[in-house]
Image (cartoon, rainbow, N blue to C red):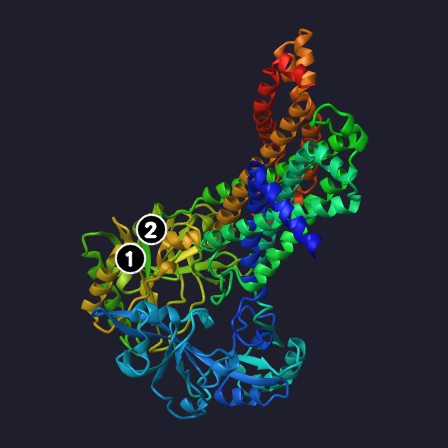
């Protein structure tokens, strides 16, 4: 123990006496370790421990797999009770989603509510931050549930400013009083809603609920699926309208199983990149230790001469390496604490759980300690092994404390430089590919203009505006009232018409032509102002007039993709098309008589994205919106200012038409924000940004490594340069010698890096979506590496050429 303390004290003294070396080494490690800890923190929060619930591996969603395109299902109250009696199931949560209207500064606002059975919170196993959650006694079977509500943390902070006295107060939801009984913790985000209310299961066979189950201990998802299969088959016989017509399989998937595969791929890619950066940092510190170790040969020889064993020197050198590693790790963890949020805000929305807690947790700190030990041994072992047996006689006989390094030491330097260059070039190539992919994503033609445009969702209150004409008139009143605002340049009505993912798919038939059963069209319901509001150009024909719109005339407008992919017989205008549409189902849905009959195509508009960023625009058919009028629509609003500044004003205009009507206004409704939150766009932005930063750091570390090696070489050959100058060598000759001293290692590193980039090109392309591997990227990276290496060699070369021969010879 005393020896270890002595080694630590001596190591600290050595680092304190050489602050420039210590700072450079610590920063080299801090960059790599900080980036590694940041990415691992996100991996821990998203993949390893994403949920704050008790045993999330036992909490399962229930799905039905069949050949049908629509595999959704719902269970009645009695069926849920039977599921809970299954020997594989411990608890069942029945639930429904709802929208509640709340008062926000005198204007109706919207709140998403989850109505769930009384034992839902016990299934999740999370205690409230304040008050209590509800129990089975608050929602007895077949009876009216208690008028109580539990607030999510985000709703509590937004509407009550974190007031801890909110428990026990009464708030009005959709004009009904509810008592606030609890507030959930910050990272409780079940289904991302604002409010939690109890719901009582009903005997009504038409009342359906979604379910989540919790398996009994020791029961796997597969066993649970097999146990529920015969029960669900019986349910399908009892209520065939609620299940697929063909055979199906019950599949249980735990919360952990459903962690998004795409974000896993992204995070593992980033973890691989930071691991490369960490290796480059470790290589850099090894180079620094080798360079400094050679200058310590006199010291090490003296210690050997007075009796220090090789193992004693090895332990001392490794102790110093570990001190550097822990110092670098400390700086890296501080760096991770301050930067992890910069990565989190750029993660694609919807690709990780709402509950994810992005912090540097205790397991992450334990990981950091492990990284410190690993890196300390990794970068310190080679220099320590090379320096543990100094040539005592050669060192003691030398007239200078500066001794030339061994051939093996120089070879080690060259190998480390080559490895560092090759890894940096690989990272540069990956960053270049990511940037190219992101640029390609940004250049995808949208076909519409999302700037300063909001798609305002209007969910009607149940059973309100129960008639086709009054509902249409109400929507038009909303549109016209919003259009009166001076900051609004245009407003339009639409349904299933918000790019870049819009329209409901259905087969079609052209009059006198073949059916499109093998190819479907996206049906969108819009008014005449929709195309001008989104700036979608009219290419042929016309748009329906006001009279045609109000009566839901049998007209249609198609896009270019429809003409190209579905019609090859000359002029499309005047042709007739027919599509199956939902049937009239008052008051939830009003349908214009003859809606699914033949429609004349009167216009062709430009292509606008309707199947995401990753797929080409599909065939689309636009119909007058009164053809289908559900209890939900959208108002598209284009403004000449930031739409977020108008949120309260627009809500006030809606309240003037109906004081009890709310509107959904979130980041998802901001069309430009929604586009940037598309997984392909957000993922490309994140990967290109981070890989660019990692590549820049790797370039910096590579430059420091080359500079250190060349500076060490120049320092060791000062007398050689002095003699050459005394014998008449030119300064250019010395500069050439300096550059040649690392040219082989740099050339070998670039060659190896090119081989790695070419060999791993297909793999990189697979992980970085939207790119194609290109040899020019690797060659461009090679050119950058040559320039950086030349800059790093410049200062030592100038120092070599300015050696005073008399001073160099006197030093000998």
Name the disc covering residue 492, or none: 1
Q: Which residue is mark 2?
A: 534
Tell me residue 247's x, y (percent): 63, 77
Closer to us: 396 or 58: 396
Mark 2 element type: loop
In screen coordinates, is 34 left or right of 127? right
Mark 2 crowdedness (10 Å alpha carbons): few <14, some 14-19, many ≥20: many
Residue 216, image quadrant: bottom right
Res. 15 image quadrant: top right
Q: CA distance from mark 2 to mark 1?
A: 9 Å
In this rendering, would 431 be left or right of 752?
left
- In this view, which residue lies farthest toward the front? 306
Pick whichever, 415 or 183, lies toward us. Answer: 415
What residue is drawn where x is 21% and y is 52%?
487
Q: Earlier in the sequence, mark 2 or mark 1?
A: 1
User: Where the N terminus falls, by quadrant?
Assistant: bottom right
In the rendered image, the vertical position of residue 493 relative to residue 17, given as above or below: below
Q: Position of residue 589 (x, y in %)?
A: 36, 74
The correct choice, above or below, for 33 with respect to 775 in the image is below
The C terminus sits in image quarter: top right
- The tag on residue 152 is none
All told, the count of numbered labels is: 2
Relative to 750, does residue 87 appear above or below in the rendering? below
Residue 19 image position (x, y, % from top left): 55, 38
Disc 2 + disc 1, Cβ < 8 Å: yes
Secondary structure beneath dot 1 equals strand
| Res. 510 visible in picture | no
Q: Nearer the viewer, residue 801 or 63?
A: 801
């Amino acid at each position: 123990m005393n020896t270890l303390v002595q080694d630590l004290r001596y190591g600290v003294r050595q680092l304190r006496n050489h602050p420039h070396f210590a700072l450079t080494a610590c920063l080299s490690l801090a960059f790599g370790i900080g980036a590694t800890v940041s990415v691992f923190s996100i991996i821990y929060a998203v993949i390893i421990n994403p949920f704050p619930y008790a045993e999330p591996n036992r909490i399962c969603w229930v799905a039905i797999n069949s050949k049908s395109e629509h595999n959704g299902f719902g269970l009645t109250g009695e069926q849920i009770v039977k599921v809970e009696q299954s020997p594989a199931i411990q608890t069942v949560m029945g639930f429904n989603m709802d929208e509640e209207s709340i008062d926000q500064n005198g204007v109706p606002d919207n709140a998403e509510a989850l109505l769930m059975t009384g034992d839902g919170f016990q299934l999740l196993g999370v205690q409230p931050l304040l008050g209590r959650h509800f129990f089975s006694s608050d929602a007895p079977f077949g009876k009216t549930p208690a008028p109580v509500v539990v607030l999510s943390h985000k709703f509590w902070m937004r509407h009550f400013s974190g007031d801890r006295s909110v428990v026990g107060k009464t708030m009005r939801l959709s004009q009904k009083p509810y008592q606030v009984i609890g507030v959930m913790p910050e990272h409780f985000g079940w289904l991302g809603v604002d409010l939690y209310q109890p719901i009582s299961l009903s005997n009504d066979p038409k009342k359906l609920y979604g379910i989540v189950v919790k398996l009994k201990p020791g029961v796997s998802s597969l066993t649970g699926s097999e146990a529920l299969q015969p029960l669900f088959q019986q349910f399908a016989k009892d209520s065939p309208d609620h299940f697929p017509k063909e055979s199906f399989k019950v599949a249980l998937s735990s919360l952990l199983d459903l962690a998004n595969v795409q974000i896993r791929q992204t995070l593992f890619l980033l973890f691989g990149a930071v691991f490369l950066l960490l290796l480059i940092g470790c290589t850099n510190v090894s180079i620094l230790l080798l360079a400094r170790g050679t200058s310590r040969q006199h010291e090490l020889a003296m210690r050997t001469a007075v009796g220090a064993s090789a193992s004693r020197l090895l332990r001392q050198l490794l102790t110093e390496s570990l001190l550097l590693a822990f110092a670098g790790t400390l700086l890296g963890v501080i760096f991770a604490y301050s930067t992890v949020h910069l990565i989190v805000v750029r993660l694609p929305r919807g690709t990780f759980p709402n509950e994810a807690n992005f912090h540097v947790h205790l397991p992450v700190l334990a990981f950091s300690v492990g990284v410190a030990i690993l890196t300390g041994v990794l970068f310190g072992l080679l220099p320590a092994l090379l320096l543990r047996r100094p040539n005592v006689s050669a060192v003691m006989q030398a007239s200078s404390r500066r001794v030339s390094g061994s051939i093996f030491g120089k070879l080690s330097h060259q190998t480390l430089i080559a490895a560092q260059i090759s890894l940096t070039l690989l990272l540069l190539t990956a960053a270049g590919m990511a940037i190219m992919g992101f640029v390609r994503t940004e250049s995808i033609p949208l076909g519409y203009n999302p700037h300063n445009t909001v798609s305002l969702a209007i969910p009607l209150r149940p059973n309100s505006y129960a008639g086709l004409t009054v509902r249409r008139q109400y929507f038009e009143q909303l549109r016209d009232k919003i259009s009166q605002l001076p900051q609004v340049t245009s407003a339009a009505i639409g349904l299933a018409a918000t790019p870049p993912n819009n329209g409901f798919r259905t087969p079609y038939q052209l009059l006198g032509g073949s059916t499109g059963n093998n190819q479907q069209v996206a049906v969108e319901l819009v008014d005449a102002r929709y195309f001008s509001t989104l700036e979608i150009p009219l290419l042929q024909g016309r748009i329906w007039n006001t009279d045609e719109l109000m009566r839901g005339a049998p007209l249609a407008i198609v896009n270019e993709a429809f003409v190209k992919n579905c019609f090859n017989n000359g002029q499309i205008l005047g042709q007739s098309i027919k599509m199956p549409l939902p049937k009239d189902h008052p008051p939830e849905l009003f349908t214009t008589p003859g809606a699914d009959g033949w429609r004349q195509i009167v216009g062709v508009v430009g292509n606008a994205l309707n199947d995401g960023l990753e797929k080409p625009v599909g065939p689309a058919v636009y119909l007058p919106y009164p053809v289908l009028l559900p209890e939900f629509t959208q108002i598209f609003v284009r403004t000449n200012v930031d739409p977020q500044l108008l949120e309260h004003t627009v809500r006030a205009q809606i309240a003037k038409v109906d004081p009890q009507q709310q509107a959904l206004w979130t980041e998802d409704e901001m069309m430009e924000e929604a586009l940037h939150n598309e997984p392909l766009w957000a993922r490309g932005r994140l990967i290109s940004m981070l890989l660019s930063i990692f590549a820049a750091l790797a370039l910096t570390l590579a430059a420091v490594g080359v500079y250190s090696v060349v500076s060490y070489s120049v320092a060791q050959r000062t007398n050689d340069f002095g003699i050459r100058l005394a014998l008449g060598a030119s300064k250019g000759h010395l500069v050439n010698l300096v550059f040649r001293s690392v040219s082989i290692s740099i050339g070998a590193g670039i060659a190896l890096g090119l081989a790695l980039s070419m060999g791993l090109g297909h793999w990189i392309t697979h992980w970085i979506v939207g790119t194609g591997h290109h040899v020019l990227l690797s060659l461009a990276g090679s050119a950058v590496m040559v320039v950086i290496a030349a800059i790093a060699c410049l200062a030592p070369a100038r120092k070599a050429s300015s050696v005073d021969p008399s001073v160099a010879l006197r030093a000998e």
